[in-house]
């Protein structure tokens, strides 16, 4: 099973998630939105699974710097368009492991996910 962590390399929360994965010897692939982009279908899937309100990072600098007109009257289509244009607006990190997905980083959720998928790779 492939585990992929999606995010932005210099994001503090992504750094914490990567440190957790590394310290628990979880093999993963890192997908950087800034250099690798974001697949529109995958982003739609995340929005369908979690709701666009969860996936859109309204507290980030990129969103807050938008003109008022872009921040008003948000709906799923407008939010998706904004996130595709500026992937920094996607809440980070997004973790995919098999069919399971998490948005954001909470150590207990990561521990639950990886204990549920089998024994810990740590001896």
Image (spheres, rainbow, N blue to C red):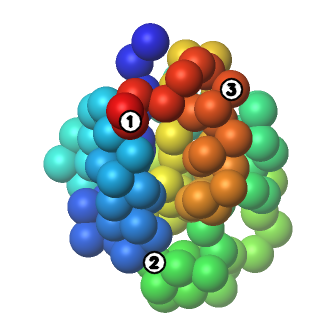
What residue is rendered at 69% in x and 41% in y? 112
Quadrant where the N terminus sits is top left
Mark 1 residue element: loop
Which residue is denoted by mark 3 in the rendering?
116
Q: Secondary structure at mark 2?
A: helix
Q: Going by the image, does 8 lie left or right of 65?
A: left
Q: Earlier in the sequence, mark 2 or mark 1?
A: 2
Nearer the camera: disc 2 or disc 3: 3
User: Decide: marks 2, 3 in contact (CB < 8 A)?
Assistant: no
Residue 31 x/y as whole percent: 30, 40
Which residue is depicted at the point 30% across and 49% down?
A: 22
Residue designated by label 1: 122
Between disc 2 and disc 3, whose residue precedes?
Answer: 2
From where the camera sits, is residue 31 visible?
Answer: no
N-terminal label among 1 and 3: 3
Vertical side of 46 occupied by 12: above or below: below
Q: Residue furthest left?
A: 35
- Quadrant (top left, top right, bottom left, bottom right) of the C terminus: top left
Viewer can see residue 17: yes
In the rendered image, which quarter is residue 19 located in?
Answer: bottom left
Marks 2 and 1 close (CB-CB < 8 Å): no
**Image quadrant where residue 47 sits:** top right
Residue 46, label in figure = none
- Compare residues 31 and 81 and report the one nearer the observer: 31
Secondary structure state at the residue bearing disc 3: helix
Q: Label 1 to label 3, Cα distance in Å?
A: 15 Å
Q: Residue 62 bears which disc, if any?
A: 2
Label 2 and label 3: CA atoms lie apart by 35 Å
Other-residue count near label 1 (Cα within 10 Å), few / some / many at <14 / 14–19 / ≥20: few
Would you say 1 lies left or right of 8 here?
right
């Amino acid at each position: 099973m492939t585990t992929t962590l999606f995010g932005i390399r210099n994001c503090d929360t992504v750094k914490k998630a990567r440190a957790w994965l590394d310290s628990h010897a979880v093999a993963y692939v890192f997908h950087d939105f800034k250099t690798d982009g974001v697949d529109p279908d995958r982003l739609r899937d995340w929005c369908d699974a979690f709701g666009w309100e969860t996936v859109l990072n309204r507290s980030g600098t990129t969103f807050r710097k938008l003109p008022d007109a872009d921040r008003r009257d948000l709906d799923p289509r407008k939010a998706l368009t904004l996130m595709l244009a500026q992937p920094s607006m996607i809440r980070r990190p997004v973790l995919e492991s098999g069919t399971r997905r998490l948005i954001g980083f909470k150590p207990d959720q990561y521990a639950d996910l990886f204990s549920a998928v089998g024994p810990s790779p740590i001896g």
